[in-house]
Amino acid sequence: MIKTFDVTAIRKDFPIFETGIAYLDSANTSQRPRQVTGAMMEYFEKYNSNIHRAAYHIAEVATERYEGTREKVRAFINAASTKEIIYTRGTTEAINLVAYSWGRRNVRPGDLIVLTILDHHSNIVPWQILAAANGAHIEFVDIDERGELRQDQFRDLLEHSPRLVAFGQVSNALGTINPAREMVAAAKAAGATVLVDGAQGAPHQGVDVQALGCDFYAFSGHKMLGPTGAGILYGRRELLEAMDPFQSGGDMIKTVRIEGTTYHDLPWRFEAGTQAIGEVIGLAAAVDYLSGLGMDSVRAHEREITEYAYEALSDIEGLTLYGPPPSRRAGVISFSLAGIHPHDLATIADRDQVCLRAGHHCAMPLMTRLGVAATARASFYVYTTTDEVDRLVGSIKEAQRIFK
Amino acid sequence: MSTGTAADDQFYREYILDHYKNPRNFGRLENPDITHEEDNPLCGDVVGMDFQIRNGAIADVRFHGRGCAISQASASLLTERLKGLPLEDAKKISKADVLGELGIDISPARIKCALLSLKVLKVGAYGLADTDEDEE
């Protein structure tokens, strides 16, 4: 039996709920507890200084805390070494780093890149740019009627020996939980390099990158109770060692001479310029917070809320749900209402202080595939309550009353 | 903050909903002198307009499209205003005019929805003006 936590107590850590909002947009960005903002404020107010270079005490503290996040993140995703933990601005920058530093050198004319129709734009566009630059081509794995990836088609594509396979652990638009471990194993067996977009995975399911077996794993701090501007690229050490720098300049070098430059060791080789120090320190507090709750408990709570919401929404006439049944999805529910555009629903919900996403969720190929221009989306996290779901149902009924 | 009760729902006033559910001048014109369509990829709103021009004035107009209540009602309202209007006057219709006609407070997030039909008119009308000059 997985222990669950007291949501009422958790919400006291999140001052934003004192405003009275019902926040149902955590797949977009999460809220942040006092522990995270407090750790950041402590840095800004007590030891604000630059890292890796100054010879005074507060800079030593800053460096220590900044580097300390790396070990916490390493443990959180069970990487083999902190050398494999690269700080980025977020998932988007992490994927761009791989597309640039690994992709430009390793993807050759005629190579195949396999992506999926569920992917977020951040796991599509960098590969499109790479494919155009290096003469590769891209194939997309389709979904079935439940919104789950067609594994038969995926296996067929693997027969063509793709150079790279990249897919999301969890779909941000439908909540589909992909069988990541099986997909990585099959792709590796086919000789592909594999990147898993963990933006919706790490915050909600957690991850063990060694068990998963992928070459790269990318995720964002701001979707897991941390601040914006601090994300992570995990890369297997032997791949990272062989990769060219991404951005270059200060802090990523060993020596710079007029004749040429030698680069810093891992992981700093990929961290050029002054970093988001306060944000990285905040990320450590977010990891601590989630670890304190336990990722199994996080998942159990989200599943409870998702099942509650799925059932409540299923009862509403004229409401169409997209994606798999609640037992096979993360805390994300996309839906549409007959005769009411998602933006109109979101505007009406906003009047009730219900924060709801409406749009294409940065997954336009998926929207095209589903034959819709946009959907409404509710997404949940550790602090979500059934009361917030009830308020969403109230807003939907109000919208139906107005538009009837 | 608003409590969202029915009576105060000025954003979705009766006439806006009426224009959304019963759009005026909806459909297509046969052999239009100009036709133009624009979309707003962020929310998937689409508005297109067909114009028939006689003696420099908009003799007839129809719009088509899909999307939220604001984009579609705004297009419907605009077509009512355009019928019979000299093209030069139509070109002068401003953003403020369109928002004023809607008569509601539009949040920054919805401005693009409200002004999509005006964009169709402007691009369409100026395109037509070019054609006219070519013919002369």
Image (tube, coloured by chain):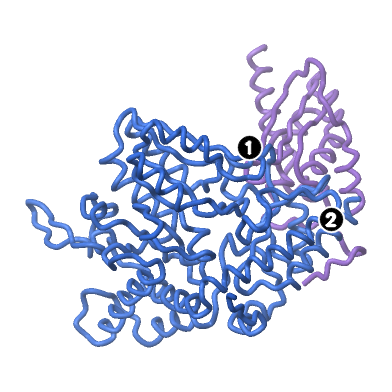
Residue drawn 61% across the image and 81% down it? A10
Query: What is the x, y in percent for residue A39?
Result: 44, 82
**Which residue is pictured at 80% across the width and 63% down the height?**
A393
> On the image, numbered disc 2 is attached to which residue?
A316
Q: Nearer the viewer, residue A165 or A189?
A: A189
Q: Amino acid at mark 1?
A: Thr
Question: Viewer-proximal residue, A38 or A26?
Answer: A26
| Amino acid type, residue under disc 2 in the picture | Ile
Q: Horizontally, is B77 left or right of A30 in the view?
A: right
Tint applied to chain A in the drawing: blue
- Up the image or down, A280 lies above or below A134; here it is below
Quadrant location, the N terminus of chain A: bottom right
Instruction: Tell us which disc is closer to us: 1 or 2.
Output: 2
Label for residue A368?
1
Element assignment for label 2: loop
The answer for which chain carries disc 1 is A
Q: What's the residue at 36%, 53% (across, down)?
A: A216
Q: CA distance from mark 1 to mark 2?
A: 25 Å
In the picture provided, is A12 more to the left or to the right than A64?
A: right
The answer to which quarter of the image holds residue A339 is top right
Question: Farthest left residue?
Answer: A259
> Who is closer to the viewer here, B81 or A260?
A260
Please determine whether, in this image, residue B31 is positioned above or below residue A96. Answer: above
Pointers 1 and 2 in contact (CB under 8 A)?
no
Q: Specify few, some or many for label 1: CA neighbours under 10 Å numbering under 14, 14-19, or 20 or more.
A: few
Shade representing chain B = purple
Label 2 neighbourhood size at 10 Å, few (<14), some (14-19), many (20+)?
some
In the rendered image of this protein, does residue A191 appear above or below residue A184? above
Mark 2 belongs to chain: A
Q: Position of residue A285 (x, y in %)?
A: 45, 78
Q: Is residue B101 above or below residue B49?
A: below
Q: Quadrant of residue B8?
A: bottom right
